[in-house]
């Protein structure tokens, strides 16, 4: 039976995971010219806290991580054209997108097989993060002219010519964010499952 971890030990561990996630975020595998990048599984340390210490610590750690990400990306707020866009960017691109990573353990709980649970939990919160960016791409960063130009570059001109402004901007947001967030989601799930397979004790609940 695992002994409950002390509060001090958990705090130190959460701080280390935040630091590790931040460092990994500075190691891009691929970067897009207008925002977004595939990182070296930078969200995995935050997800790991959720599996080890439950939803309360997972959410708290992920929330603090989201504020650090906001501070690192605060220059992006200068591109927001309205107060509503600033609020939307803060919530969708940072606070909600990263804080909800702390729910990975909730998704994993119904699974009796630990590997499946880890994979499902990691995938679910990664997709929620993608959903936040997808919504932000339309609500905050909607730009019909750029969306049409970007989609046309990939030979979609004829397919999208009949789409209205709103439909095109929704489609653009879905595709653009998918180009980097879905590959990162796959990498993160694979890394989580492999790590769980090799070192299952790392994912064992500590309380």
Image (cartoon, rainbow, N blue to C red):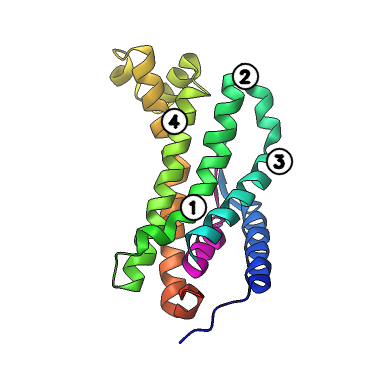
The residue to which callout 4 is attached is: 135
Classify residue 25 as left or right of residue 162.
Answer: right
Mark closest to the chain's N terminus, 3 or 2: 3
Q: Is residue 69 above or below residue 164?
A: below
Q: Which residue has dot 3 on it?
A: 71
Name the residue at 68% across, 71% down.
Answer: 8
Q: Position of residue 133 (x, y in %)?
A: 48, 36
Question: Element under label 1?
Answer: helix
Tag nearer the camera, 4 or 1: 1
The one nearer the camera, 162 or 136, is 136
Which corner quadrant of the image does residue 24 belong to? bottom right
Marks 2 & 4, CB-CB < 8 Å contact: no
Find out whether residue 44 is within the magenta segment: yes
Work out how far the residue at label 2 is from the one at label 1, CA to CA, in angstroms. 26 Å
**Numbered badge on residue 83:** 2
Residue at x-position 65% and y-position 23%: 79
Task: Please identify the quadrant where the N terminus is shown.
Answer: bottom left
Q: Does residue 32 appear in the picture of this structure?
A: no
Disc 3 to disc 2, C-alpha distance: 18 Å
Please say if 190 is above or below 27: below
Q: CA distance from mark 1 to mark 3?
A: 18 Å
Classify residue 30 as left or right of residue 79.
left
Q: Which residue corresponds to the image point at 64% horizontal and 71% vertical from the top-left?
A: 7
Residue 101 — which label?
Answer: 1
Secondary structure beneath label 3 = helix
């Amino acid at each position: 039976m695992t002994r409950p971890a002390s509060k001090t030990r958990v705090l130190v561990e959460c701080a280390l995971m935040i630091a590790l996630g931040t460092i990994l975020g500075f190691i891009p595998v691929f970067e897009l010219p207008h925002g977004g990048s595939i990182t070296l599984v930078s969200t995995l340390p935050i997800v790991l806290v959720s599996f080890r210490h439950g939803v309360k610590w997972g959410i708290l750690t992920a929330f603090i991580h989201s504020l650090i990400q906001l501070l690192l990306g605060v220059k992006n707020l200068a591109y927001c054209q309205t107060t509503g866009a600033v609020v939307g960017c803060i919530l969708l691109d940072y606070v909600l997108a990263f804080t909800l990573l702390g729910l990975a353990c909730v998704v994993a709980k119904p699974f009796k097989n630990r590997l499946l649970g880890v994979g499902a939990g990691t995938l679910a919160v990664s997709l929620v993060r993608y959903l936040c960016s997808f919504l932000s791409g339309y609500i905050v960063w909607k730009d019909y002219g750029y969306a049409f130009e970007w989609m046309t570059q990939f030979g979609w001109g004829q397919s999208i010519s009949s789409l209205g402004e709103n439909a095109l901007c929704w489609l653009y947001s879905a595709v653009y964010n998918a180009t980097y967030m879905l590959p990162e989601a796959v990498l993160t799930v694979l890394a989580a499952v492999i790590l769980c397979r090799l070192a299952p004790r790392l994912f064992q609940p500590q309380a």
